[in-house]
Image (spheres, rainbow, N blue to C red):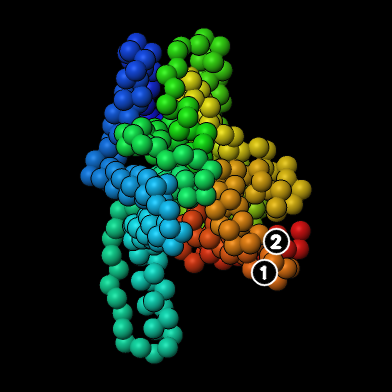
């Protein structure tokens, strides 16, 4: 199910109405059931992947919160990380790895050529995997307490407004909010609906209309003029922003109606004055995730300029890889890293 669908226009009012009608103690249960239903409308069997990630990170977080020996705690954490990244890598990057290996073997003159595999990418896997990893690392670092209720934790991972396209929330913000029953508030609901309306306008009116022109030009670029390609490139920049930011606004507005505050994910990124400032405004939940869970653990800028340059490039390269399973995304990430150094 996607936000800009007729199904969602039925799903959201029904979920909201029953959420505020049901007894306060079981409202979170209704949200959990609704969130899994929302996800299973895409491919029901892939909900098992989300459940597996949930169960593994739940067990690992409980373990690291109770184990005293540092080496054992780290081993459990690493095991949980490897499991989740392994699952993400298999479903998202297997095709890319096979393609790269075939290209390398061909360039070196080897006859080896692996067949391509057709693996359906589970929707939202990059988002809920990172959210689960962030929670587990936060428990390990002592930044948040381990959730003892498996099903409450499952709601944190599967909360439908931000499940498939973010924002990627932190456990110390979202877990606490989901544990609290929320009563209906007219002003909050009004504000949430207005934010949703802004999101629908950006997604449906601007992004989807812009896509018609962009696809027409890029799909037939050989016969298009330079001016048309240049205009399509500029329009695509608007389309890309409104598509993603619009979806984020719908998510934030939906959650707000239900009494949950999600983090701001976009803050006028095209008004940025540098590459660094751009990434502080674009997909903020992802940029801050890489900062907190990759850049800072690598040492940030505390170990000299050369190490800092390496850390910056590593973060941007991984960010590029996160955005797409192709070498062009890796190159795009590295380009951003290089521009960051000269900005």
**Within 10 Å of the Cα at label 2, are there few (<14), some (14-19), or many (20+) other Cα atoms?**
some
Q: Position of residue 7 (x, y in %)?
A: 33, 26
| Dots 1, 2 in contact, CB < 8 A | yes
Q: Position of residue 259 (x, y in %)?
A: 48, 20
Quick check: can you spot residue 84?
yes
Q: Is residue 15 left or right of residue 237?
A: left
Quarter containing the C terminus = bottom right
Residue at the far front: name it: 68
Q: Describe the element under mark 2 as helix, strand or loop.
A: loop
Q: Which residue is mark 1?
A: 307
Work out whether 339 lies above or below 235. Answer: below
Which residue is at the front of the view, 185 or 121?
185
**Within 10 Å of the Cα at label 1, are there few (<14), some (14-19), or many (20+) other Cα atoms?**
some
Q: In the image, what residue occupies the spot 39% across and 76% down? A: 101
Circle nearer the N terminus (1, 2): 2
Residue at the far bottom: name it: 109
Q: In the image, what residue occupies the spot 61% across and 56% down? A: 296
Q: In the image, what residue occupies the spot 65% across and 37% down? A: 267
Which residue is at the front of the view, 289 or 206?
289
Q: Which residue is mark 2?
A: 301
């Amino acid at each position: 199910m996607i936000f800009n669908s007729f199904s969602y226009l039925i799903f959201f009012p029904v979920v909201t109405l029953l959420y505020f009608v049901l007894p306060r103690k079981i409202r979170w249960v209704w949200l959990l059931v609704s969130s899994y239903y929302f996800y299973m409308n895409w491919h029901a069997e892939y909900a098992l992947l989300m459940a597996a990630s949930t169960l593994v990170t739940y067990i690992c977080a409980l373990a690291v919160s109770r184990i005293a020996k540092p080496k054992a705690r780290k081993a459990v954490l690493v095991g949980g990380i490897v499991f989740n990244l392994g699952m993400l890598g298999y479903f998202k990057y297997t095709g890319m790895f096979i393609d790269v290996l075939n290209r390398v073997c061909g360039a070196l003159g080897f006859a080896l050529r692996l067949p391509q595999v057709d693996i359906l990418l589970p929707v939202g896997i990059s988002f809920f995997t990172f959210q689960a990893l962030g929670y587990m690392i936060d428990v390990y670092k002592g930044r948040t307490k381990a959730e003892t209720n498996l099903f409450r934790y499952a709601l944190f991972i599967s909360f439908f407004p931000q499940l498939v396209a973010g924002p990627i929330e932190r456990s110390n913000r979202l877990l606490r909010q989901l544990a609290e029953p929320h009563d209906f508030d007219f002003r909050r609901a009004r504000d949430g609906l207005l934010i949703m309306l802004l999101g629908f306008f950006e997604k449906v009116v601007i992004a989807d209309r812009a896509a018609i022109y962009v696809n027409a030009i890029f799909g037939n670029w050989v016969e298009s003029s330079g001016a048309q390609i240049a205009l399509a490139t500029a329009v695509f920049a608007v389309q890309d922003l409104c598509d993603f930011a619009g979806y984020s606004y719908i998510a934030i507005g939906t959650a707000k109606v239900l009494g949950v505050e999600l983090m701001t994910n976009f803050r006028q990124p095209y008004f940025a004055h540098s590459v660094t400032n751009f990434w502080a405004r674009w997909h903020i939940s992802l940029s801050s995730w890489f900062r907190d869970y990759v850049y800072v653990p690598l040492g940030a800028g505390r170990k000299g300029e050369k190490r800092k340059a390496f850390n910056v490039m590593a973060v941007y390269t991984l960010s590029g890889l996160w955005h797409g399973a192709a070498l062009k995304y890796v190159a795009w990430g590295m380009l951003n890293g290089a521009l960051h150094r000269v900005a």
